[in-house]
């Protein structure tokens, strides 16, 4: 069922969450937050920085598979969010969910789940906000220092 912008905004404000089922356990999807995007970005930075040749999917995928353990952390963070009432509990819960995702979901399921979760993160709004703030920063007048030179020097 497609949500209107108003429904999505209302769900976010009221912190209504969707649910996802992984390995027989149901998880509530955390409401979107910038903190979650920051954590997800940190996990994404752990992925290998390579350009894959889609002409040889099997060997290309197998050559980087061992470097992609962060995929579970990325998806787990998108699901449980970044609220850290108890830091140790948060990390334990995320790691347990990441392992469950990696062991019990197919690549097709992980791909579909990642796309679904990213759609709920309001990334377009985050982009608009950061673009707006960066433009303000660029338009800010810079401090011009007065340079004085000794008499007769240019």
Image (cartoon, rainbow, N blue to C red):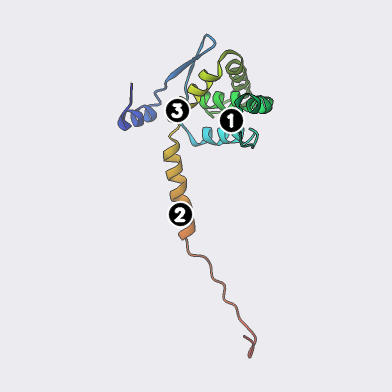
Q: Percent from the top left, x then y, of residue 124?
A: 42, 39
The alpha-carbon separation of the residues under discs 1 and 3 comes to: 38 Å
Question: Disc 3 or 2, which lies upstream in sequence?
Answer: 3
Q: Percent from the top left, x then y, of residue 43?
A: 61, 32
Residue on which disc 1 sits: 55
Element at label 3: loop
Q: Quadrant of the N terminus?
A: top left
Q: Residue at x 45, y 54 (%)?
A: 135
Mark number for residue 135?
Answer: 2
Q: Which residue is mark 3?
A: 31
Q: Which of the pair 121/141 is nearer the observer?
A: 121
42, above or below 106, in the image: below
User: Does residue 46 appear to the left or right of 107 in the view shown?
Assistant: right
Q: Residue at horizontal 58%, vertical 30%?
A: 55
Q: Residue 106: image x %, image y %?
A: 55, 16
Mark 2 vs mark 1, CA separation in Å: 40 Å
- Displayed quadrant of residue 74: top right
Q: Secondary structure at mark 1?
A: loop
């Amino acid at each position: 069922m497609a949500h209107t912008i108003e429904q999505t905004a209302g769900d976010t404000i009221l912190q209504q969450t969707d649910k996802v089922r992984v390995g027989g356990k149901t998880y509530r999807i955390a409401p979107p937050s910038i903190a979650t995007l920051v954590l997800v970005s940190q996990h994404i930075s752990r992925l290998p920085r390579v350009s894959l040749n889609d002409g040889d999917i099997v060997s290309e995928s197998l050559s980087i598979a061992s470097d992609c353990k962060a995929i579970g952390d990325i998806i787990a963070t998108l699901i449980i969010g970044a609220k850290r009432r108890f830091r140790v509990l948060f990390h334990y819960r995320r790691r347990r969910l990441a392992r469950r995702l990696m062991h019990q979901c197919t690549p097709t399921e992980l791909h579909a789940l990642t796309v679904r979760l990213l759609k709920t993160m309001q990334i377009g709004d985050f982009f608009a906000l950061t673009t707006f703030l960066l433009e303000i920063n660029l338009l800010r007048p810079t401090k011009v220092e007065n340079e004085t030179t000794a008499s007769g020097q240019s």
